[in-house]
Image: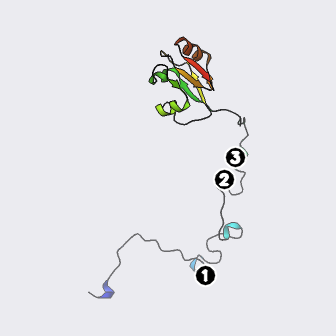
Amino acid sequence: MKLSDLKAFDLDRKKKKRIGRGAGSGHGKTCCRGSKGAGSRSGVEYGPLFEGGQMPLFRRLPKRGFNNIFKKDYNIVNLKQLDVFSDNEVVDINSLKEKGIIKKIKDGVKVLAVGEIKKPLQIIANRFSKSALKSIKDAGGEPKFV
């Protein structure tokens, strides 16, 4: 065996495109970049919403509604979720987070009357539904507004 008899493995290797090496290479003159404009220059970057000069989708669609910047986003807590607390315990936003009833503290807590409450609890919240207030008072609890 001689050095000239050695052959490389037949791997799937793609040859590098040699651009800018004359018209005969097929990749000369404009170097596969088209002609003129930002795309033919180095360092061109188009934004993710650029559609080649076509009117972008977000401008073709009509505007609808509005976002209220003053809207409060409350954590919703149902009465049936408060069974994990013992009698006469103080229930506030921090104790709800510790027990895993709410995951993230938002703008406050709103208590709704889904389910029943049988224990007297001191519930401190930003808002209560009317039926939740009645249920808490009937169970001997004390609702407090923040």
Sooner in the amino-acid sequence: mark 1 or mark 3:
1
Mark 3 burial class by Cα count in 10 Å: few <14, some 14-19, many 20+? few
Badge 2, how many Cα within 10 Å: few under 14, some, many 20+? few
The disc, 2 or 1, on the residue closer to the chain's N-terminal end is: 1
Residue 22's tag is: 1
Q: Give the farthest residue toward the left.
A: 1
Pointer 3: what residue?
58
For image coordinates 69% across by 70% down, the residue present is 35
The image shows residue 73 at horizontal and vertical percentages of 63, 33
Q: Give SS at disc 1.
A: loop
Whole-number angstrom distance, CA of label 2 to CA of label 3? 9 Å
x%, y% of residue 66? 72, 36
Q: Looking at the image, which residue is at 58% across and 13% down?
A: 134
Give the total number of marks visible in the rendering: 3
Question: Where does the C terminus fall, quadrant-wise?
Answer: top right
- Tell me the CA gap for discs 2 and 1: 36 Å
Q: Give the side of residue 100 with respect to residue 10, left or right.
A: right
Instruction: Return the residue at label 2.
Output: 49
Q: Secondary structure at mark 2?
A: loop
